[in-house]
Every structure is written in structure tokens, then in C-alpha cells.
Image (tube, rainbow, N blue to C red):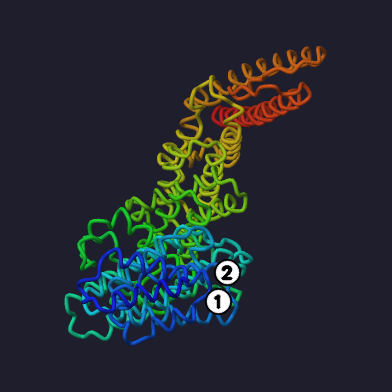
Amino acid sequence: MAVEELQSIIQRCQILEEQDFKEEDFGLLQLAGQRCIDEGHIDQLLEIIQNEKNKVIVKNMGWNLVGPVVRSLLRNEQEDDKRKCHFLLLDLLVKLCNPKELLLGLLELIEEPSGKQISQIILLLLQPLQTVIQKLRNNKAYSVGLALSTLWRQLSLLPVPYSKEQIQADDYGLCQCCKALIEFTKPFVEDVIDNKENSRENEKLKDEILKFCLKSLKWPLLTAQFLEQSEEAGDDPLKCFASEIIGFLSAIGYPFPKMIFNHGRKKKIWNYLEFEEEEDKQLSESMASLAYLVFVQGISLDQLPMVLSPSYLLQFNMGHIDILLQRTEESVFSKGLDLLENGLLRIEDSSLVHQYLEIKSFLTVPQGLVKVMTLCPIETLRKKGLAVLQLYINKLDPQGKYTLFRCLLNTSNHSGVEAFIIQNIKNQIDMSLKKTHNKWFTGPQLISLLDLVLFLPEGAETDLLQNSDRIMASLNLLRYLVIKDNEKDNQTGLWTELEKIENNFLKPLHTGLNMSKAHYEAEIKNSQEVQKSKDHCSLNVGREEIPNMPPEMQLKVLHSALFTFDLIESVLARVEELIETKTKSTSEENMG
């Protein structure tokens, strides 16, 4: 019945001129064709399409049959012979139909599905789509751009595989699609290369390919995790995709050195105005992704001029590193850590001159590392952030270290980070006293830095528990200075400033310890009384209420806090004892 209905529609249309075809004819043909496919009459449908008498009808209306054929293929319900007929029918329609109408029809089909069917339909239609675009005589650049943006938009709905197992399983087909997308794009890249006249249409085609490459650098490549370098590079489809994208950029006249090193500068590098306007907003992450792929993954690294110094390369990568560290996704900011580490390992210790810190990113990047160290939920990345920050400190010259320490002490707002910086200050003072005299960690410059260390932010009211790491590090530094620097020599300037240190740090710390211990001892007494009554109650620790804690746990927390105060108090007592001994010894020498 369906075949007869279709033949009836075909016969009626055969006597009409092309321009006389009506909209209802298109709809009737599609419905009849759909029924033929549903009822399994694919062979008869093939005969009708292949019939030379129906050439004009197929050219104008046949694209309406592509949807039913594709949907039937996606259902995957046919036997092998029938499935081959479906593919043959699809190929025939691509060959015979109006390419302009067919292009729009194929793109509409690509936009239809969701979930795992996205990759299935893209893999099915990429080859037909390529063929259709190559048949177009006009506006090829526009058609390529429309196709690439549609494909990218649909693929961006898929999750990027994270682990080696996910990459190999490729459940959502993203890796297969990336490989197929490269093959889809290659002929159009070759068109750009082969066109030596640089016509306006060719420039437009180049711009469309450039836009696609930049989008691909941002997604999926910015969030993609790549297999370890030791593993077979050829087994990593996303790395292969990245390599091809960078190759496309170079082929169309945008080699990566030109893009990375000119990004953000006043020099114009884009021919297309849209790229200039969107550079700061959209391209920063694409450029950061490109820098990571080149310097960390080593893709096309041989294109880099050998004359560039490691510090020069680091300078240009710092902006990219800053962009990566600002992102909150582990897969992105970890690339920032890797890129920074890669750049720093090329540089000798203490050779990065302090003038680099006048560049904004050289101060914002270490602040980004602090965020990773303090906010990242993954311990390995927190530790890596700490290790990379230490590496960064090691590469700076003495004035650079001094400047960075001041910056981080003022901005980190984290006791553990401040303790880490104070330990580094101590190390620099030790080197200056033992090896080479360094004006930045002795005398007036050091005293200015110690003003940020040897004080309590809120005086005696400072939360000692919350700031315990910083306070212990400060006391240990002060103890070291008292032991290593004699009042007579006063190389560090400590003894001149001793009265100020006592007033701003030691005395308020004494008062604060007494207040804190009294508070926690009262809390312990209260908790013990509650324990007798078998009730639960809330507890204030570090000015924050911890509700509904069992009394046994409360006591454990409170005793831990008291232990911390006792530890601080013992170090404080030792420092004051050392100060008294040193000043008494000096007084006796002066009297003698």
C-alpha cells in the first residue's frame, strides 16, 4: 500500500514543472517514503529513486527522505542486507538531491538527538555532510562554518572522558567523533592551502577553520586529561585530535609561536575583526590550552625558535598559567600547575630577576597557587600546588623572594600558608648569615618584613587556635634570630626592634593565651557536666559553633585545643628565656 501511494505521488509530480511543485507534495512524499521504510519496502524505494524519470523530483524533494532513512538506521533494527540498502539509499540521496536543501536537512538531523545518540548520528552523517558541502558552488565558507559550529555545539553536550579507562571505553563516542571530525575538516584545510590567490572566499574559509580550531582548543582540549607521556601517544585519541588541530592552525597561517607570543599584545594578529573584539573574553582560554599542549604535551614543540631563553618563555606563559589557575575544574587548573612547573624547571635557582614581579601575572599566579593549596579538595593537587610554589620561590632572586613574601603575607589569609612563608623567610635569613650577605634579609629591609610576621592581627583578641600555625612559625623564627644573631653584632636588626616586638607580639600573645586557656578550661568543665547528664550540646571552637557534638568528642576537641596553647606557651617561654639570657650577657659584657 505504501509503495503504491508513493508511486501515485511520483506519477502526479512527473507531469509538473519544477517550479510547480507544491509544499503539500513535499509533505506527502515524505510521509509515503517514511511508510515504505517502516514497512520494509526499501528495495522498491531504491528503484523509484534510481529511476531516471524521477530525477527532477528526487533533486527537489528527495532530501525529505533523508530524515526517515537516518532515523531507521539509528534504530539499528534491520538485517544486514536491508541495512546495506539503507546506506545505498542515503548515498543516492546525497548524490542526487539539491545540496543546499540537503545541507540544512542534515544539520537539522544532527541537532535532533541527545545523549549517546549524538555521536551515533554525527558519525553516520559526517561523510554525507562533507560530500554535500563539496558540491556547493557558492558560499562554501559559510556552509563549512555552519557545519563545524553545529557539530561542535552538539559534541560539547557530551562528557569529556577523564581516565584512561573512560578514554578507551569511549561510552559517549566523543573520541571517535573527534577523529572523524578531523577527517571531515581536512579537505577544507587543503582548499585553503591550495588556493594561492587568497580570494575573499578563501579568507572567509580560513576564518571559519580558525574559529573551529580555537573552539576545539577550549573544548574538549582544555578539560581533557591526556594519557601519561610514557604510554603510547598513538593510543590517546584526544592528544591525536590536539595534534591535528595545531597542525590545521599552522597550515592556514597561524603557527602556534605567532599565536601564543602575540596574544594579548597590541600587535594585530587576526584578520577577522570578531577575533580582535572577543580576544580577551573568549580566546584567553584557547591560548592557554594551546600553550599547555605545546610546552607540557610537547605537540609541535620543534616549531619553537631555539634562541628563546627559559625566562622569556616563562614570561609569555605566565598569563596563560594565570588563566588556567583561575578555573575551578581540577582538569583545567592542574594544567596550570603542570605548565608552570614545566617553565620553572628550565630556569636556574635564584636567576629570575625581581623586575618580573612588576608584571601582574607574576604575582597573581602565586596567589592562584595559594588557592589551590587551601581550597582544592584533592590532596595530591594541594601538595603539588605547595611544591610548585616552593619551586617558584627558589627561582626568584633575593629581592624577588622578598617582594613575593610581602605579597603573600598580605593576601593569603591562611595560617598554614603564612607559616610556610615564614619558614621560607627563616631559610633566607639563615643563608644570608651563613653564606652570602644579603641586604634583603638582614637589617632595615628584614625589620620591615618582620613587622608583617611578629605581630597578632587583632592583638590579644586574635583567635589563637585558628592562627596557631602562623604563631608557631613566628615564634620559631624569633627563637632562631635570638640564637643566631648576637645583640652586639645585630646583623638582622632584631635587637634594635626588640621593644616593639615585645609590645606588638609577645605581650599580646601572653594575654591571649591566658584568655584562651581560661575559655577552653571553662568549656571542658561545662562539657564534663553535660557528659554526666548524658545530653548533647553545642560547642564554640575558634568562634564557630559546632552543634550536637557528643560530649566525648567535645572533650577530645577541647583538650586538643589546650594542648596547642600549651605548645605555644612553651615555645614563647623559651623565646623569652633566650632573650633574657642574651640581654643579660650583653649587659655584663658592657659593664665589664
Contact, mark 2 vs mark 1 (Cβ under 8 Å):
yes
Which quadrant of the rendered structure holds the C terminus?
Answer: top right
| Mark toward the start of the polypeptide (2 vs 1) | 2
Residue located at (49% from left, 72% from top): 37
Helix, strand or loop status at disc 2 = loop
Q: Position of residue 214 (x, y in %)?
A: 35, 65
Q: Label 2 belongs to which residue? A: 227
Distance between the alpha carbons at the discs numbered 2 and 1: 8 Å
Front residue (pair 56, 384): 56
Figure quadrant of residue 289: bottom left
Helix, strand or loop status at disc 1 = helix
Q: Is residue 438 left or right of residue 553?
A: left
Q: Amino acid at mark 2?
A: Leu
Badge 1, how many Cα within 10 Å: few under 14, some, many 20+? some
Residue located at (40% from left, 53% from top): 322
Q: Is residue 539 left or right of residue 278?
A: right
Give the answer, above or below, for where 189 lies relative to 570: below
Q: Position of residue 253 (x, y in %)?
A: 28, 77
Q: How many marks?
A: 2
Q: What is the residue that sits farthest to the right in this orientation?
A: 532
Regarding residue 295, the answer to whether it shows in the image is no
Q: Label 1 belongs to which residue? A: 233
Residue located at (22% from left, 73% from top): 139
Q: Position of residue 263 (x, y in %)?
A: 29, 62
Front residue (pair 388, 146): 146
Figure quadrant of residue 555: top right
Residue located at (50% from left, 62% from top): 224
